[in-house]
Amino acid sequence: MDLRGKTLCASGFHTPRRGTIDVLDDVLIEIDGSGVITAIHRHGDPNYRTIRYTRDMSGELVTLPPGSYLLPGFVDLHVHAPQYPQLGDALDVPLEVWLQKYTFPLEAKYEDVAFARRVYGLLVDDLLANGTTTALYFATIHQEATRVLVDTCLEKGQRALIGKVAMDNADECPDYYRDASPQAALEGTRALIDYVRGHPDNGDGRVLPVVTPRFIPSCTDATLEGLGAVARECGCHVQTHCSESDWAHGYVLARHGMTDTESLDRFGLLGRRTVLAHANFLTERDMETVWTRQAAVAHCPLSNAYFANAVFPLRAALEKGLHVGLGTDISGGPSASMLENSRGAILVSRMLQSGVDPNLPAAARSTFGSAQIDFRDAFYIATTGGGIALDLPVGQFTPGYQFDAVVVDTEAEKGTIRLFQDRDKGEGVLQKIIYTASRPNLATTWVGGQQV
Ligand code: GUN
Ligand code: FE
């Protein structure tokens, strides 16, 4: 059902501020003709009853059934669209081997536009069915296939930020899969920006272009410098991998004599609209720099377990006031579900805090200090945090924000959440959703008020 121009009466949850869940109880959400929330009315507000009655009489009221809960759509802050065929596969080797052995050969196949069309169609459908209403995508080096991803998101209605991957360093990228020169990397990036901004079906800017140096190892300095200039000229988003693994972090220290964060900053690639994937090995000073630049981190907990040799210290970052969102890192992480990744974020935070070596006594096992987060923080980074990271009005039900939302049907027969009326109440219901709901429970997804 199209909710543009309608008022939705729903119960559900959102978390505009970290640490606090706002429980929505039969609230009225007014949505304008362009899919933006214009007002929220709660039980007890002076005109609640009048508005509910008049909207009902005029046929503009839509009411969610009991047992259904409205959440903000998820913001997946790190997805490699071309890696979808590899989801749940190729997790047996370290990052630098994985790239050369599995990932570059797969990404090279997107030379074939028909292949791209098939994979990207499946991926966007699956992400929408998983409640992901906004995704920040790495595509491949190919201009045509990357345009196919843009077209696919526009056709299917997903809010998306998409980058043609720039990678031209012959020392780290194979002959069969690399930009031919810095000029090729920069021209490809500019061409994608023009394509997205000039797209006839993208009048409302649902898809945005992203400057996307893969990571420092795969780019020459000329390309990094050129991309910094493009980002400045175009004012668009930037995404890259930052200090992800021991190898990646050490490579940049050896080549540039500084950390990824310092190097990206010198190239002008660290700004308010920059998203750094992983960022596991940030130093104290790096964190300061990221904070000062108001850049963001995409925390990818499942991927960290396979490729990072470490867990991102999420709680410390949030407490410092860094912008952090959640990413699946398809296919470095083996799940396309933001709910599963939310659980993953909680799980790895607890293991980081306790340590995991059973041969050590408890005091010696725990070396890190406080790291544990709960379902509130996980839900925050999966929604509000992602919106803030992207500087977009998404991730919460607040006037002026896009109506991007997903309905969790807790009574779906094939679902995986079971509520017990006498014990599951208030934000406890959200806790159970985060821990146990899955795709069969996700009934409806809207982006900008449009059902997708
Ligand atoms: N570093 C450079 N490329 C990649 C990638 O595709 N995935 C991950 N997880 N890390 C990377
Ligand atoms: Fe990645």
Image: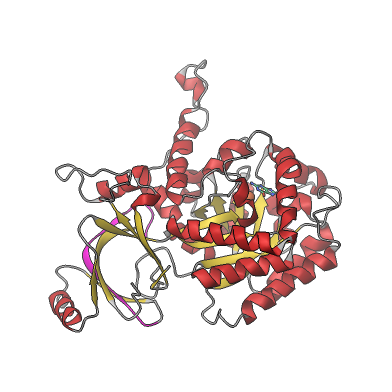
> Is residue 95 or residue 58 the one in the foreground?
58
Compared with 56, 282 (above or below) is above
Compared with 289, 43 (above or below) is below
> Is residue 44 or residue 151 the one in the foreground?
151
Compared with 41, 181 (above or below) is above
Q: Quick check: 143 left or right of 342?
A: right
Q: Quick check: 20 left or right of 227?
A: left
Specify start and end residues of the magenta stretch as a single range. 15-33
Type of colouring = secondary structure
**Residue at point 48%, 63% (across, down):** 388
Compared with 230, 86 (above or below) is above
Q: Is residue 245 visible to the viewer in this orientation of the structure?
A: yes
x then y, percent, for residue 363: 47, 21
Q: Is residue 19 magenta?
A: yes
> Is residue 268 or residue 339 the one in the foreground?
339
**Residue at point 61%, 80% (across, down):** 199
